[in-house]
Each structure stands twice: as structure tokens, then as C-alpha cells.
Amino acid sequence: MSDTRRTLLDALAAGPVSGPDLADRLGVSRAAVWKHVEALRDEGFGVESAGDGYVVTDVPEYGGPAIEYGLDADYDVEFHETLDSSNDRARDLAAEGASDVVVVAREQTASRGRKSREWSAPDGGVWLSLLVRPDEPPVYAPLYTLAMAVAVCDAGREAGVDAKIKWPNDVIVSEANDNPSGAKASDGVSGSEASGGSPAHAGDRSTDADAPDDRGYRKLCGILTEMEGEADRVSWLVIGPGVNVNLDPAELPEGATSVAAEAGPVERRVFVQRVLERFDELRGDLDAVLPAWRERADTLGRRVRVHTASGVIEGDAVDIEHPGTLVVSTDAGEKRVHAGDCEHLRPADDGR
């Protein structure tokens, strides 16, 4: 958003503010202030002129200015009613040199996940992609995806959902503590596979419509992260969570759920704000990411089967290590998994 729009929204969010005060803060005339206020009204804001100045009486349920209003994190928001892919748009912005931009789409028409899976992204969900340029080596990239999983999990919990995280970055609602069937869980990839100018995929925003419905959890969110960088530094990261928020359960594939289905509808602008603010906290303190992830993990303590490029690893998930490596205790000793497709089988202490 422009500096003028940012200043205007920040001033209005702080409480009643007079026209002359706004003119001084914005460095514009009283007439220009009126035009800016009218533009907000056109966006759906309720703005009244009271005795002590302008007062916001109503905020749109969704939209760019609505997300920016009261957002306690320094991100620009680019909002689209319809977009092919928010990740693709964020990649374009990265090529233009942008940073700290959130691309949000009310709906997406060409959504993609890992392995080029197609998935549905209708109005009612939260489909966003965050472009950042961390001053870190590529090995740190998975931490940002884990941080986003924690952020979505926390926003879901604030909304009343008993959200947890499945390794590495699916946000889920666990149906039981035991899943003896060994039903296949959704795909996930941890780590960064990029070198040079190649993108890396860490996670999957698809809702796994072909997965069985007895896998022991319902999927709320998947995350697709893409990276470009060199051997010693990240050029940019695009972290794209796709969250089923105000979607009717009848519109969802088997094995998926939504915030509305679990706890009732929420204001999407507030949900997005909470995700961005929590992510921003963790982004500023990467040492806090793994402990936060562990506290919200559904995978740790479970019997798992992980399909990796070099074979299948089965055992008890006992820990996660920097930068997102899953530690699995097997009959042959501890194995460390950097990337793979993880299935939840049964609790680790359930006996074999």
C-alpha cells in the first residue's frame, strides 16, 4: 500500500482523528483528506465525521484495505478478486524486486500444489502468498514454512479450532489419538530443493481429495513454499498457505475441514491479520520456531511411515531438528528425514 494509505489507516485505527490532524499527518490538503476518506467509503468502510473527528464505524469483511486496517505487521497487501495463482503473482513481484508483500485472492482459478496437483480455491477460503527476502542461507528456508504453519495453527486456535500440525506443514484437526488402519496421510515436503534460479516446493496446498477418510485427521491448511537463491543466500521466498476458512463442508473433498465447520464462520480479514502478525513475530525470532512447532505437533509421538526419495522409513516420530528435519526412531536406530511423504499410523507407545 502507499505511504499515504498506510498513514491514513493507522490514524483511523487509533481512534477519532480530525480533518486538520489527518491533513498534517498525510501532508495533503483538507480536500485531499476528504477524497481519501471517500475512497475508503467506496471500499466498503463506514467512516463518519463526528465532533472529535473521523471515526470508523464499519470495516469490510475482506479486501486489501480491510486487511491493512489495524494490521500490526509491516506488509503491503495486494488484493485480487480473482487470480490464477497467488504464488505465481508473488513470484512476478519478486522478479520486479518487491519484498514484504502479501498477495491475497478472493478466489483462485488455477491453483496448484506440489507435483502440479490441482485443487479448488473458491471464495470463502484464505488464499494468500507472502513474499519475503530473508538475510539467511538457503538451509534456513524450511524454518519460514514451519513458522507459517505455526501462524495458521495459532490463528485457527484463536478462532476456536483444535488445530495441530502434521509434519512438516499441514495444519489439521486430529480425529483421534489412534489410527490403527495406517491410512495414507497427505503429502508434505520439508526443506529447500532450490539451487540457483530453480524454485523449491515445501508442502502442498491441495486438499487430498483422493485420500481415504479414515486417516485420523481432517486437513485444514496446506502450504506451498517456493524459493530462489544462490549457494550462500536466499534471494526470495514465497510462502503460500491455502486455508479452508468459511467454506461449507459440503463443498470440501473427503478428509478436509474448515474453520467454519469446526467452530463457525470468522472474519477473514481478522484471520489473515492474525496469521501475518504471528508469522512476523516468528520471522523475527527464528530460534522460537522449532519449539513452537513442537508444542503444536500432532506427528511427534506417533508411529509414522515416511516415503523418501531413497526408500521408506517407518518408526516412531520422536523429534524435529533444525531446520525442520524429522527424527524417526526405527528398529535400525534413529533416522533423520529431510523431505518425504508422511503417513500417521498409530501412537508410538501403542506397542507393535
Image (cartoon, rainbow, N blue to C red):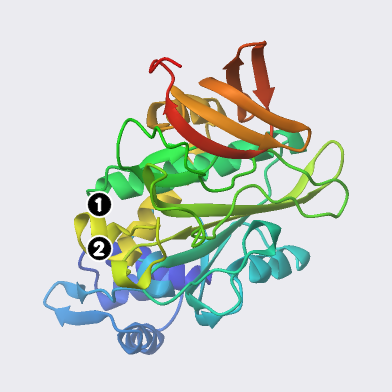
User: Residue 6 appears at what percent x and percent y?
Assistant: 45, 67
Q: Image quadrant of residue 61?
A: bottom left
SS at mark 1? loop
In the depicted view, which residue is nearer to us: 246 or 329? 329
Q: Image quadrant of residue 292?
A: top left
User: Residue 35 appears at what percent x and percent y?
Assistant: 38, 89
Q: Residue at x 56, y 21 (%)?
A: 315
- Say if residue 218 shows up in the picture: yes
User: Residue 341 appears at what percent x and percent y?
Assistant: 62, 41
> Image check: 194 left or right of 261?
right
Tell me the kind of residue under disc 1: Ala
Give the Cα distance between marks 2 and 1: 7 Å
Q: Which mark is residue 266?
A: 2
Report if the CB atoms under discs 2 and 1 are less than 8 Å apart.
Answer: yes
In the depicted view, which residue is nearer to us: 44 or 10? 44
Dot 2 or dot 1: first in sequence order is 1
Tell me the kind of residue under disc 2: Val
Q: Residues within 10 Å of mark 1 (few under 14, many from 20)?
A: many
User: Residue 110 appears at what percent x and percent y?
Assistant: 61, 76
> Which residue bears the numbered disc 1?
159
Above or below residue 226? Residue 35 is: below
In the depicted view, which residue is nearer to us: 166 or 227? 166
